[in-house]
Amino acid sequence: MKFDLLTTFLEVSRTLHFRIASENLFITQSAVSARIKLLEDDLGVLLFDRSHKHLKLTMEGHRLIKHANELLFMWQKTKHDVGIVEHDAQQLAIGSMNSIWDIVLQGWLQKIHRNLDGVSLFTSTYSPVELRKNVINRTVDIAFLFEPPFVEDLVTDKVATVPLHLVTTDRKHMKELKLDNYIMVDYGESVNTLHMREFQGAPPAKHFMSQPRIALNYILQAGGSAHLPRQMTFEHVEANNLFVVESAPVYHREIFAVYLAKSQKTEVIKQAIGLFPHLAV
């Protein structure tokens, strides 16, 4: 199967419009139609319902999206892995949940770059379930999760404990526990459950966001409050753009690195994990 067929399919599934997809892919609309038809012929199913005014994905089309993304990812990873052999480098595939990247991993990637010359990084973002599966099937070398998996074949190392402080853009709320325009950030099930218990009588969250960086940028512009990592808010607190609500509970979130016990890359994985300071962030 040609990978350009899958790329074209994913673009059409995203835009649900042949013309817009063709413009985004820099090919003609007839080429887009021909690729989709060829892919449908190869699979023996219809991927799009063309009987209505607007294009719609069929059930088979919806199912193909996940597989197409996985196949394209593996192809990119394969090209990267094969290509770096010529440069005597070793690929290290890092996978993480969305919300962990900004908290601890950005600085850690820089440490790998400075200290492990022979390592070529390949990073990706997954859900917790996908991360566990991808470590086991060797798609990901190191996964970062809030909830450690209890699987016999996996090694789990705690790499950070992150305090999450309630901050607000409203100075008046520094001394009072009031959740106005609260943004709920996804730090995993245990923190979400703890928050619901601590604030049973509070109004529901205004918005739900997967990444603390997005929540931070949002409240700085629109106002509001959120539980955010200390290192992410420090400069804004110092500049009086954000205020710590002293009476609010502080949550603590542990972050774990997970890798395959029998990985062929165990030595470089341990070297990379060893670059964490193992201190609260």
Image (cartoon, rainbow, N blue to C red):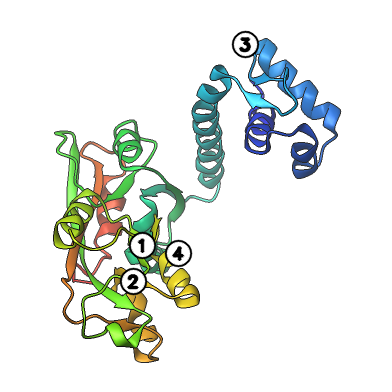
Q: Amino acid at mark 1?
A: Leu
Q: Dot 1 surroundings within 10 Å: few (below 14), some, or many (20 or more)?
A: some
Q: Nearer the viewer, residue 215 or 260?
A: 215
Q: Is residue 67 above or below residue 110?
A: above
Pick the quarter of the image with the C terminus: bottom left
Q: Is residue 262 left or right of residue 81?
A: left
Residue type pointed to by label 2 = Asp
For marks 2 and 1, give the CA distance: 30 Å
Which residue is drawn at the image coordinates 16% and 35% (left, top)?
Answer: 151
Lower position in the chain sequence, tag 4 or tag 3 = 3
Please tell me whether residue 273 is drawn above or below residue 55 in the rendered image. Answer: below
Disc 2 crowd, CA 10 A, few/some/many (<14, 14-19, 20+): some
Disc 3 is placed on an element classified as loop
* Residue 178 x %, y %: 25, 74
Question: Which mark lies nearer to you, 3 or 2?
Answer: 2
Q: CA distance from mark 1 to mark 3?
A: 42 Å
In space, the residues marked 1 and 4 are separated at their CA atoms by: 16 Å
Residue picked out by circle 3: 45
- Measured from the top left, where is residue 138 in percent x and y? 35, 35
| Label 4: element kind | helix
Q: CA distance from mark 4 to mark 3?
A: 39 Å
Badge 3: few (under 14), some or many (20 or more) residues near its Cα, within 10 Å?
some
Q: Percent position (x, y) of residue 100?
A: 34, 58
* Spatial CA span between label 3 and label 2: 50 Å
Mark 1 = which residue?
105
Outermost residue to the bottom:
239
Identify the residue at image location x=77%, y=40%.
20
Callout in the foreground (2, 4): 2
